[in-house]
Amino acid sequence: MSHTILDLLHQVMSSPWIYLALFLLAVLDGFFPIVPAETSVITAGVFAATGATNLALVIAVAAAGAFAGDHISYLIGRKAGSRLRDRPRTRKAYSWAAKALAERGGLVLIVARYIPGGRTAVTITMGAVAYPRRSFAFFDALAAGSWAIYSGLIGFFGGMAFEQDPIKGLLFGLGLALSITAVVEVVRWVRKRRRPAAADPQHELVEASR
């Protein structure tokens, strides 16, 4: 059974169409976060250690796809911006988000790329508050590029560590990525617990834009 799965994965990863698939998955992940883009990039990174894929190309297409997907999410928020600004229920959240993102929007965008669902919430909000498009593109290039490098290298080093058993390399890479995500989420949960309980204006803004 494991050999059948391994053979199938190797065939998929050896196909030149894998790069188009990685690009499209990364695009969709920008505004539809349940798409397994990161898992796919990690998997492609694992097989780069065996020569089935090209690591540099995997990283490049993943970064390009993430960049494009984030801009689609930004445009969705931009289209909903006037509606959110004029609604009494979201006017306060709109003002808060505009001020917060004007002060540290670039950092928020980069950090959110590593938080499940966080990147979609932030990119939609940045569009909704009309965050400058040039600044968004600059910081998003950093975010998308760093994410693609991170995901590709996690897979590659997992594949290198278990060169004779890519399945173990894949499990190692996915386990490492999940562990890092879990640590980030625990830190966020602890910080949130320490703050006084209050409604999250950014969450209200994102929910209303849907």
Image (tube, helix red, strand yellow):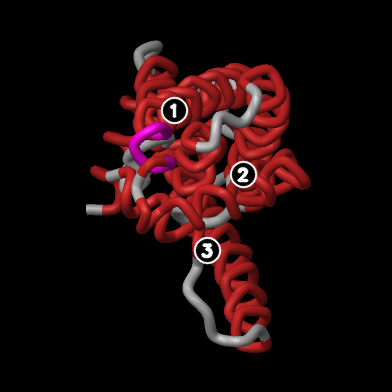
Q: Tell me if 8 is positioned left or right of 14 in this view.
A: left
User: Residue 204 lies in what quarter of the image?
Assistant: bottom left
Q: Quadrant of residue 76?
A: top left
Q: Give amino acid for label 1.
A: Arg
Residue 150 in the image: state x and y as whole percent.
67, 42
Q: CA distance from mark 2 to mark 3?
A: 32 Å
Answer with mark 2 or mark 3, whichever residue precedes in sequence: 2
Q: Give the CA separation, mark 3 to mark 1.
A: 32 Å
Residue 115 coordinates in the image, percent (x, y):
55, 56
Under circle 1, the secondary element is helix
Instruction: From this view, report whether residue 96 is shown above or below residue 28.
Output: below
Rendered location of residue 119, percent (x, y):
52, 45
Residue 165 in sight from this viewpoint: no
Q: Mark 2: give few (<14), some (14-19) or many (20+) Cα within 10 Å.
A: many
Residue wearing tag 2: 98
Q: Which residue is mark 3?
A: 178
Q: Nearer the viewer, residue 109 or 145?
A: 109
The residue identified by callout 1 is: 78
Q: Which residues are magenta?
A: 81-85
